[in-house]
């Protein structure tokens, strides 16, 4: 829009957007944990952890808006590492449920995922409309996109669980969410690294991502 170049989006539009998606993710994370516990669902608990990590990332992004690009890259890297750790935890829980057994509630999975999908879509659209996204805002957008895809997987798994009574669809989606988180974490870390080249006006060379 004309005239926007004179506006500090970091203290206005971006900050307001991040506050909204932060609290929406907190609410959804609580819902996932509560429903996931009663539904005995690895997929719901996985998404609860995912949305919790998202909320932390959004909080870091809010702090990063008023700070240097170095600080922003550090916040993005922390976000990426959190996703990798989260992915490992979800896979470990899925293995435990596979060995010990579980009885996920298909209808509860379906209902919770449908509500979360609507909320995540709202968050994603808000973040996509934000102009001049820095590395932390791009990380936030990646998280919301991952969440939206994961919700669709839970809906499918919930339907299959209702039809078959088996627990494997829940476990498969839980591991799939972990894989999405793994990919998202790698992308965020890569984006943070490439931001160094954008700032310096230099070209990326193979192997230099390992520099400090």
Image (cartoon, helix red, strand yellow):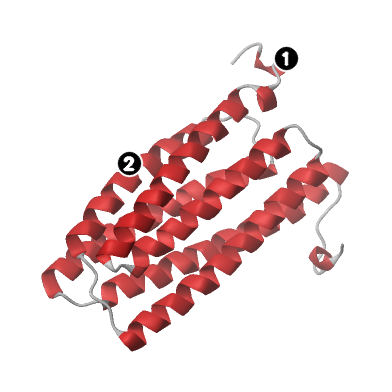
- Identify which residue is drawn at 72% across, 39% down: 64
- Identify which residue is drawn at 65% across, 41% down: 61
2 and 1 marks in contact (CB < 8 Å): no
- Identify which residue is drawn at 33% across, 86% down: 100
Identify the secondary structure beneath mark 2: helix
At label 1, counting other C-alpha atoms closer than 10 Å, the crowd grade (few under 14, some 14-19, many 20 or more) is few
* Residue 87 placement, left or right of 156: right
In the rendered view of the protein, which quadrant contains the C terminus? bottom right
- For the image, the number of numbered tags is 2
The percent position of residue 167, horizontal first and vertical second, equals 25, 76
Q: Which mark is residue 6?
A: 1
The percent position of residue 18, horizontal first and vertical second, equals 56, 34
Identify the secondary structure beneath mark 1: helix
Q: Earlier in the sequence, mark 2 or mark 1?
A: 1
Query: Dot 2 corresponds to which residue?
Result: 118
Which is in the foreground here, disc 2 or disc 1? 2
* Residue 161 placement, left or right of 205: left
Examine the rendered structure and indicate whether residue 183 appears above or below residue 8: below
Residue nearest the viewer, comparing 51 with 124: 51
Q: Quadrant of residue 5 in the image?
A: top right
Q: Residue furthest top?
A: 3
Examine the rendered structure and indicate whether residue 26 appears above or below residue 41: above
Q: Quadrant of residue 86 in the image?
A: bottom right
Whole-angstrom CA distance, mark 2 to mark 1, is 34 Å
At label 2, counting other C-alpha atoms closer than 10 Å, the crowd grade (few under 14, some 14-19, many 20 or more) is few
Q: Residue furthest bottom?
A: 99
The percent position of residue 59, horizontal first and vertical second, equals 61, 42
The percent position of residue 34, horizontal first and vertical second, equals 34, 56
- Identify which residue is drawn at 52% across, 39% down: 22
């Amino acid at each position: 829009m004309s005239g926007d170049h004179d506006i500090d989006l970091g203290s206005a539009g971006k900050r307001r957007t991040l506050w909204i998606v932060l609290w929406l993710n907190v609410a959804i994370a609580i819902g996932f944990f509560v429903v996931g516990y009663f539904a005995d669902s690895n997929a719901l608990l996985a998404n609860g952890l995912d949305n919790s990590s998202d909320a932390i990332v959004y909080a870091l992004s809010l702090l990063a808006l008023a700070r240097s690009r170095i600080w922003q890259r550090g916040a993005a890297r922390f976000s990426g590492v959190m996703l990798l750790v989260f992915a490992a935890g979800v896979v470990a829980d899925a293995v435990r449920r596979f060995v010990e057994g579980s009885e996920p509630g298909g209808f509860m999975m379906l209902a919770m995922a449908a509500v979360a999908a609507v909320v995540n879509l709202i968050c994603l659209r808000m973040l996509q409309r934000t102009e001049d996204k820095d590395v932390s805002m791009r990380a936030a957008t990646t998280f919301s996109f991952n969440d939206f895809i994961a919700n669709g997987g839970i809906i499918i798994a919930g339907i299959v669980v209702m039809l078959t009574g088996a627990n494997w669809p829940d476990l498969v989606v839980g591991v799939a969410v972990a894989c999405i988180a793994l990919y998202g974490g790698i992308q965020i870390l890569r984006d943070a690294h490439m931001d160094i080249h954008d700032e310096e006006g230099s070209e990326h060379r193979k192997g230099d991502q390992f520099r400090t």
